């Protein structure tokens, strides 16, 4: 793919948590996003996962000891190879030693070197929950965070502070290693389908998967923005999520979230019609049933009325397969709501991993082909230019 970490050198420190078994897949995921990866391992990590497996995953030699070759300086020094140093998994022992500048393993030595050389450092802890809650460990985390180190919050489950997902780690690595052109910006993104209740069981909805909206949110986060995602499909690690269901709930949430936002990206497939829901289940049978549909207010129009100066990006899905018609309708929406630009695509991409879209402005319609995350990166870049022009 190469979207989030293209041309990025990642030094990956592996310590002696059982979560080290996930290192191989994490290294693959970093490389899938465009990174070059070189690993550093502690003795304890080597007892859990063999360096040969990590060498295979990274396609590079693995550092297992610091020798006269000063591997830590070569990797993480001021003129070193790494753009970012990632410790994943990081044990309580390692976090404490990094906080105290104790350099008794290749990983802690690389961490001290990186911090002294202003190389960004990302830490993904993994340990039993009581250890994560220990006052000394919490103090160590606070101390290291105060130095600008980014901690990727673990998933606390089954009495364990489990290592964060690969999606979360890759997103934070991209954010730490990049230029953060959207740093200090707050972006609101709508995503997925909305649902209109017909009765307590049935809903009217559409086929939107939310992949594009989540991709935009992730790309904006990687570019340094604080992201609020209005969504109906659970938590994501790179945004503050507001759960919504109906078009009205999403519109109300958008108006509230945009009060202190720099931009709104309206990527959700919001219901165009709603219905008065029956208080009890409509009984099934052989008789036909007619539902009276009422149009829902347009979210971007409502937000534009509330915030005349806000940068707003619209999405427009059509089903005819005609680019000229798609551009014409996108421009009509652009003018009506005074949008920054509109992302127009054919409805056939709903639910797919790849997409084809047209980024439509008043005098231009640029084509994009690729993954939905790639489209998210493109939208984030266009938004950067838009907000830069407005500054």
Image (cartoon, helix red, strand yellow):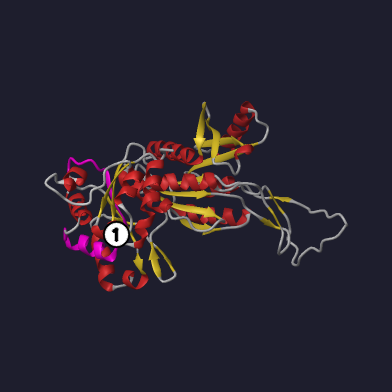
Residue 15 shows in this picture = no
Which quadrant: the C terminus?
top left
Residue 32 picture location, percent across and down: 41, 41
Residue 140 falls in which quadrant of the image?
Answer: bottom left
Q: Is residue 375 left or right of residue 207?
A: left
Residue 42 picture location, percent across and down: 24, 56
Residue found at the far right of this picture: 287
* Neighbour tally class for label 1: few under 14, some 14-19, many 20 plus, Cα within 10 Å: some
Q: Which residues are magenta?
A: 78-103
Q: Is residue 243 left or right of residue 112?
A: right
Is 226 one of the magenta-colored residues?
A: no
Q: Is residue 206 left or right of residue 280?
A: left
Q: Secondary structure at mark 1?
A: loop
Residue 154 picture location, percent across and down: 38, 62
Q: Residue 68 or 228: which is nearer the viewer?
A: 68
Residue 321 picture location, percent across and down: 65, 30
Q: Residue 383 or 53: which is nearer the viewer?
A: 53
The residue shown at (25%, 68%) is 139
Residue 214 shows in this picture = yes
The residue shown at (26%, 47%) is 62
Whether residue 340 is situated above or below residue 167 in the rendered picture:
above
Residue found at the far left of this picture: 68
The residue shown at (21%, 44%) is 75
Which quadrant: the N terminus?
top left
Q: How many marks?
A: 1
The residue shown at (20%, 63%) is 97
Whether residue 172 is situated above or below residue 338 in the rendered picture:
below
Is 98 one of the magenta-colored residues?
A: yes
Q: Which residue is mark 1?
A: 47
Q: Is residue 278 left or right of residue 286?
A: left
């Amino acid at each position: 793919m190469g979207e989030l970490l293209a041309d990025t050198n990642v030094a990956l420190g592996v310590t002696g948590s059982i979560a080290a078994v996930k290192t191989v897949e994490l290294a693959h995921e970093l490389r899938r996003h465009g990174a070059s990866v070189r690993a550093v391992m502690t003795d304890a990590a080597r007892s859990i996962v063999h360096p040969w497996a990590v060498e295979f995953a990274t396609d590079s030699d693995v550092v297992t000891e610091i020798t006269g070759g000063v591997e830590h300086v070569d990797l993480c020094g001021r003129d070193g190879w790494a753009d970012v140093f990632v410790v994943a998994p990081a044990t309580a022992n390692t976090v404490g030693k990094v906080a105290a500048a104790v350099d008794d393993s290749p990983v802690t030595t690389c961490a001290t070197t990186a911090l002294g050389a202003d190389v960004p450092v990302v830490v993904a802890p993994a340990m039993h929950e009581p250890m994560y809650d220990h006052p000394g460990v919490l103090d160590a985390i606070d101390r290291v965070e105060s130095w600008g180190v980014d901690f990727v919050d673990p998933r606390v489950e089954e009495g364990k502070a489990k290592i964060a997902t690969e999606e979360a780690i890759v997103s934070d690595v991209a954010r730490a290693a990049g230029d953060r052109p959207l740093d200090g910006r707050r972006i609101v993104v709508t995503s997925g389908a909305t649902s209109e209740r017909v009765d307590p069981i049935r809903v009217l909805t559409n086929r939107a998967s939310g992949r594009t909206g989540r991709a935009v949110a992730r790309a904006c986060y990687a570019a340094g923005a604080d992201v609020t995602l209005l969504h109906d499909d659970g938590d994501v690690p790179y945004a503050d999520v507001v759960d919504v269901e109906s078009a009205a709930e999403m519109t109300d949430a958008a108006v509230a979230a945009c009060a202190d936002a720099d931009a709104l990206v309206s990527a959700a497939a919001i219901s165009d019609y709603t219905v008065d829901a029956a208080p009890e289940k409509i009984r099934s049978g052989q008789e036909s049933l007619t539902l009276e549909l009422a149009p829902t207010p347009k979210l971007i129009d409502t937000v534009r009325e509330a915030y005349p100066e806000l940068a707003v990006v619209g999405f427009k899905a059509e089903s005819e397969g005609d680019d000229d018609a798609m551009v014409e309708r996108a421009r009509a929406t652009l003018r009506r709501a005074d949008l920054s630009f509109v992302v127009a695509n054919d409805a056939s991409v709903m639910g797919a991993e790849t997409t084809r879209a047209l980024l439509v402005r008043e005098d231009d319609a640029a084509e994009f082909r690729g993954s939905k995350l790639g489209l998210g990166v493109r939208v984030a870049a266009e938004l950067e230019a838009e907000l830069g022009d407005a500054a």
